[in-house]
Amino acid sequence: MIKKLIRKILGVKEKNGRKSDEPVILGAEQHGIDARLLSSNAVRVTSTLQEAGYQAFVVGGAVRDLLLGVKPKDFDIATNATPEQVKKLFRRAFIIGKRFQIVHVMFGQDLLEVTTFRGPSTDNAPKDEHGRVLRDNTFGSQAEDAERRDFTINAMYYNPASEEVWDYHGGIEDIRARTLRIIGVPEARYREDPVRMLRVTRFAAKLGFQIEPNTREPITVMAPLIDNVPPARVFDEMLKLLMSGQALACLRQLRQEGLHHGLLPLLDVVLEQPLGVKFVTLALDSTDRRIHAGKTVSPGFLFASLLWHQVLEKWNAYRAAGEFPIPALHLAADEVLDSQTEKLALQRKIGSDMRDIWAMQPRFERRTGKNPYKLLEHPRFRAGYDFLLLRCESGEIDAELGEWWTAFYDGDETEREQLVAGASQAGGGAGGGAKRKRPPRRGGRNKGDGQGEGHEGAPATAGGGSDRE
């Protein structure tokens, strides 16, 4: 308690006693950044600003990634030019943001974010009743800007012209020690912006870093503050977390820090069920593999996977109450999606993609006549098919269904006709002849159409090689 009180009164000391307004400046030989990893447009923006008489640096996560030898996906620029001054220097530049104004500079499809150095937050800056800063457009010096950033590893500045890294808070040391450390008093910084608790969790999982004890300590107690953040911001952060290439690790880290409750309310229940855990694990692992392979990933597919077992549970309940399968599925989907809107601002397109994927599942059971051919023409067929394979691999439904559709999808016209004929002879539920009956698996879930019990079995791949567009 005494240590915590001292921290709150005096703030967190710099580790080496250095004043935070005196940066350590490292040359190319010291930091080892490979200039070939830099974006040519990032260099173009910094040089344009510098030629106009302003300071300009690549900043934040891009510098962190460069120091780790990773090519950054995005490049942010920090400058002492105001948003209006930045806008005048570029043909396609747009000032956006209410909480803090930034400039989006466009080169074709490439977007770079340019921010003016931020000054210290003022006491009269608008806040909500929990202390979260709502709007703060105070500009300041580079040292003050570094003080305002969240973590030491994200508070470094790189000048492409001089190839120097400016480090105000020991970020280089923390990167080398693989440590995540918040700048300032953790409790105050989390209260200013509760999303920082999600960010530290994402960085820890994605980078494989340890969270420094003082940075971690308040998270469990302060986690409920995330409820006060606008749903759109929470959704953006959750999407970054799930699309980080380390989704499984991020989810485990969320649970470890006690942050998962409430973010995806229905997922809390799924992760307590063995079948649900297996399905979600397979879906996230498949997503991580696709991201690492440089393939596209549909957010709609990802969220459809995360929430499927809640849809399945409610779907079965509606059918047990007398609803027909298709209307029952739509009712279940509506109920699950409605329950998420309070916490996550799911975009309309993502919600539509989720519905399409779910709605296709009972149609995969209909393998007679023209039904398979019509389903094959569905614009979201590949996403629905990948989803079906995940259901098979998790043991929710018999692997035979996925195998039949794989053969149908890969087959030529003659092979497809034979598969449909075989399904017709078997009564529409099985492909390629009569299926050997198996005893029901204890605790097994119903198939999508409720006509049989699920059995263990897995196809060769789940979502491998397909684009979930």
Image (cartoon, rainbow, N blue to C red):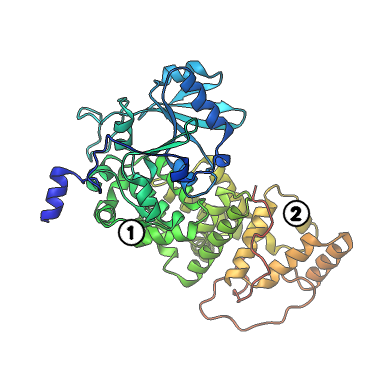
**How many discs appear?**
2
Report x, y in % for residue 227: 32, 46
Seen in the image, is 255 located left or right of residue 336? left
Marks 2/1 in contact by CB < 8 Å: the verdict is no
Report x, y in % for residue 362: 64, 60
Report x, y in % for residue 413: 87, 59
Labels 2, 1: front one: 1
- Which quadrant of the figure has residue 441? bottom right
Residue 256 or residue 308, whichever sits in front: 256
Residue 83 or residue 449, whichever sits in front: 83
Q: Is residue 238 visible?
A: yes
Q: Quadrant of the N terminus?
A: bottom left
First reached walking from the N terminus: tag 2 or tag 1: 1
Seen in the image, is 385 located left or right of residue 15? right
Q: What kind of element bears circle 1? A: helix
Which residue is disc 2 drawn over? 376
Q: Residue flagged by tag 1: what amino acid is it?
A: Glu
Label 1 crowd bin: few (<14), some (14–19), many (20+), radius 10 Å: some
Report x, y in % for residue 110: 58, 32
Which residue is disc 1 drawn over? 257
Seen in the image, is 421 located left or right of residue 22? right
- 209 vs 127: above or below: below
At horizontal 49% and vertical 52% (from top left) the residue drawn is: 242
At horizontal 79% and vertical 76% (from top left) the residue drawn is: 433
Q: What kind of element bears circle 2? A: helix
